[in-house]
Amino acid sequence: MIIPDWQLPQNVRAVSSTRQRGVSTGAYQSLNLGMHVGDSPEHVATNRQRVMTYAEMPSAPVWMNQTHSTQVLNIDHPTTDIIEADGIFTRTPGVVCAVMTADCLPILMTNTSGTEVAAVHAGWRGLAGGILEQAVSYFSGDVMVWLGPAIGKAAFEVGDDVVTAFTRGDPMAEQAFEPRQQAGKWSADLVRLAQQRLHRVGVTQVSASGLCTYSDAHNFFSFRRDGVTGRQASFIWIK
């Protein structure tokens, strides 16, 4: 497990998984946590139980059906129901907020007093649509953020439509894109786009893992790299 490098309140716990120490095989080797990607449900269930044990979670994580939306839901009790959202917020101790990724940006949030936490799934559509602003609006007090493992700028190629989606409302977003040799193609920096969006709503305590899912096949699943692949996950909860 990855322990995020940030100064958390003492009563908040955050961890992020790699693809190591699981039971899945083939394209999903080995700690795949995604039940929706074609892996054996029995293997995924075992992997999820292992993560709970590794991280000493107080309850089963609350999992989302992530659709690149801007939906963030406030969850006030542990549940095994699949939540239709791309962000989970809670003020309830023991509720484990989970976000699955395989190139998109996992984002963990807490207020500085440790009474509120959230986990957010942010691909370019969610970022451009305002999911971070939506998540931050739930919090009271100053917010701290950790940006987890995601596809790096060198590997993340996008088209003109993605550049336009960000720059039409914020010309400063141009700084997160670099043109490639092929016309109409750009390298996009998801982490920088997230940082810019957070700074615009007053969130300045932002830490980043610096880890690229695409370039590190040993530790991370990557949809862009492999197509058929598993999912790692990031978790946060109030003790």
Image (spheres, rainbow, N blue to C red):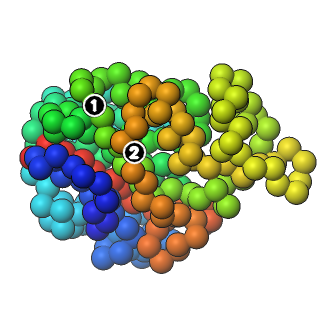
Vertically, is 32 above or below 57?
below
**Residue tagged 1:** 142
Residue 217, image x, y percentages: 52, 74
Query: Would residue 189 be found to the left or right of residue 232 on screen?
Result: right
Q: Residue at x 57, y 41 (%)?
A: 193
Do labels 2 and 1 touch, CB within 8 Å? no
Classed neighbour count for the residue bearing mark 1: other residues with Cα under 10 Å, few (<14), some (14–19), many (≥20): some
For the residues labelled 2 and 1, the Cα–Cα distance comes to 11 Å
Residue 206 numbered tag? 2
Which of 203 and 190 lies nearest the eye of the viewer? 203
Which of 159 and 60 lies nearest the eye of the viewer? 159
Residue 138, image x, y percentages: 30, 23
Which of 124 and 174 lies nearest the eye of the viewer? 174
Residue 238 numbered tag? none
Task: Specify the amino acid type for callout 1.
Answer: Asp
Q: Residue at x 82, y 54 (%)?
A: 180
Which of 152 and 18 lies nearest the eye of the viewer? 152
Vertically, is 76 above or below 158?
above
Classed neighbour count for the residue bearing mark 2: other residues with Cα under 10 Å, few (<14), some (14–19), many (≥20): some
Quarter of the image holding residue 22? bottom left
Mark 2 element type:
strand
Residue 71 seen anywhere in this rendered image of the structure: no
Q: Residue at x 31, y 65 (%)?
A: 2
Query: Would residue 179 be found to the left or right of residue 177 on screen?
Result: right
Task: Specify the amino acid type for callout 2.
Answer: Val
Q: Residue at x 88, y 57 (%)?
A: 181
Query: Where, quadrant-wise, is the N terminus in this rendering?
Result: bottom left
Mark 1 element type:
loop
Whichever of labels 2 and 1 marks the residue nearer the N terminus, that label is: 1
Instruction: Please tell me how many numbered marks the rendered image carries.
Output: 2
